[in-house]
């Protein structure tokens, strides 16, 4: 290791280490990350092939048999997601289904189950015609008092209760 004056300002590193700014850090193999506190390579979470830390939400690439959903690697996609390819990503990732789908089999019109207030027509979720909102002021009161979440008055205020927020 070649360093200037104080030993903490490196210009070159020994074999097995790389220069990161002015510090030598260990070169780590897949399945490990550079632990700067201990200056060693530590093991990634079992779902990670490469990572930035030990946690399951610190994966860069997923291990064999895992898919990336949001910032973690999972064995199968969760509800509202489907597995697929992504440009530049060496493993499959979980893509979000169309907005009103609870579950789908792929991109576009491949819904298999719809959110409340929608019905399935040719693998697409469309607004259920039987959803008729009651008085708007009443429905806003239902929503602001979190009665939608408790499933109270949902049938009377189906459109208002479907809105996010």
Image: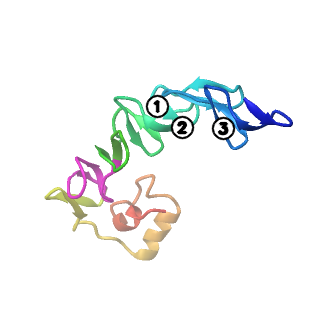
Q: Nearer the viewer, residue 7 or 159?
A: 7
Residue 123 on the magenta span: no
What residue is shown at x 82% (from left), y 33% (from top)?
7
In front: 83, or 110?
83
Magenta stretch: residue 104 in it?
yes
Q: Residue at x 37, y 48 (%)?
A: 88
Quadrant including the N terminus:
top right
Please give the residue where the numbered disc 2 appears in the rendered image. Answer: 58
Mark 2 surroundings: few (<14), some (14-19) or many (≥20) residues within 10 A: some
> Could you say which quadrant of the image residue 118 lies in?
bottom left
Q: Secondary structure at mark 3?
A: strand
Left or right: residue 111 compared with residue 92? left
Q: Do the CB atoms of the residues marked 2 and 1 lie less than 8 Å apart?
A: yes
Residue drawn at (47%, 58%), measured in percent from left and top? Answer: 147
Vertical position of residue 58 compared to residue 47: above or below: below
Q: Counting residues from the N terminus, which is met first, the one under dot 2 or under dot 1?
A: 1
Whole-angstrom CA distance, mark 3 to mark 1, is 24 Å
Q: Mark 1 and mark 3 in contact (Cβ < 8 Å)?
A: no
Question: What's the mark number on residue 48?
Answer: 1
Does residue 81 appear to the left or right of 53 in the view shown?
left
Q: What residue appears at the point 75 percent right and 32 percent down from the top-left corner?
A: 2
Residue receiving disc 3:
19
Which callout, 3 or 1, points at the residue further toward the start of the chain? Answer: 3
* Magenta residues, start to end: 95-115
């Amino acid at each position: 290791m070649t360093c200037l004056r104080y030993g903490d300002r490196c210009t070159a590193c020994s074999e097995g280490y790389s220069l990161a700014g002015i510090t030598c850090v260990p070169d780590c193999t897949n399945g490990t990350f550079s632990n700067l506190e201990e200056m060693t390579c530590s093991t990634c979470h079992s779902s990670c092939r490469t990572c930035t830390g030990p946690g399951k939400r610190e994966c860069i690439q997923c291990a064999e048999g895992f898919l990336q959903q949001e910032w973690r690697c999972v064995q199968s996609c969760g509800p509202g997601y489907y597995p697929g390819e992504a440009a530049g990503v060496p493993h499959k990732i979980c893509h979000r289904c169309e907005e009103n789908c609870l579950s789908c089999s792929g991109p576009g019109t491949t819904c298999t189950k719809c959110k409340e207030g929608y019905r399935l027509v040719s693998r697409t979720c469309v607004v259920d015609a039987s959803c008729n909102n009651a008085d708007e002021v009443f429905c806003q009161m239902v929503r602001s008092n979190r009665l939608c979440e408790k499933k109270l008055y949902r049938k009377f205020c189906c459109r208002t209760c479907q809105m996010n927020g």
